[in-house]
Amino acid sequence: MTPDLDPILQAPARLKLMTMLTAVSEAEFATLRENLAVSDSVLSKHVTALAADEYVRSRKGMHAGRRTTWISLTPAGRAALRSHVAALRELIAGVE
């Protein structure tokens, strides 16, 4: 039986984004953009797709006198990532 990979998490940037968010309560948009080495628009599209499935949430506010956005992982997102990683591990278990 083939494990079920989450199609939303198959994009490498989304998987890396989700993985980065497991280590923090929330991360600033600019920090994520820099660590993923993507443009604002690319990150925004990934965040929008993940938020549509309620894997992440965002909040806007002020930081150091400027508007910023923070992104956080939801419990549903954490569960989806856990399941996706388990499926990946099962897939690669037979690789020698």
Image (spheres, rainbow, N blue to C red):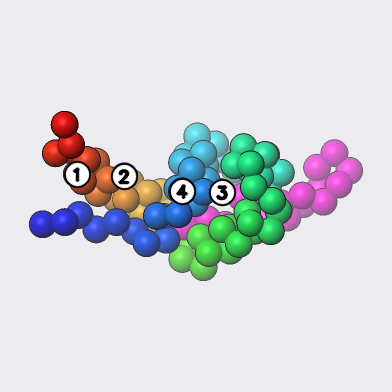
Q: Tell me the residue that label 4 is attached to.
A: 12
Mark in front: 4 vs 1: 4
Residue 82's place in the image compared with 51, above or below, is above
Q: Position of residue 16 (x, y in %)?
A: 48, 43
Mark in front: 2 vs 3: 2
Residue 79's place in the image compared with 54, above or below, is above
**For the residue marked with disc 1, what is the amino acid?**
Glu
The CA span between labels 2 and 3 is: 19 Å
In the depicted view, which residue is nearer to us: 73 or 10?
10
Q: Position of residue 42 (x, y in %)?
A: 63, 56
Pick whichever of labels 3 and 1 is earlier in the sequence. Answer: 3
Q: What residue appears at the point 14 percent right and 39 percent down from the top-left corner?
A: 94
| Extreme residue in the bottom direction | 52
Q: Is residue 57 left or right of residue 34?
A: left
SS of the residue at dot 4? Answer: helix
The CA span between labels 3 and 4 is: 18 Å
Mark in front: 3 vs 4: 4
Q: Position of residue 3 (x, y in %)?
A: 20, 54
Q: Tell me the residue that label 2 is attached to.
A: 85
Q: Tell me the residue that label 3 is attached to.
A: 72
Mark in front: 4 vs 2: 4
Q: Tell me the residue that label 1 is attached to.
A: 90
Q: What residue appears at the point 29 percent right and 50 percent down from the top-left corner?
A: 83
The CA span between labels 4 and 1 is: 18 Å
SS of the residue at dot 1? Answer: helix
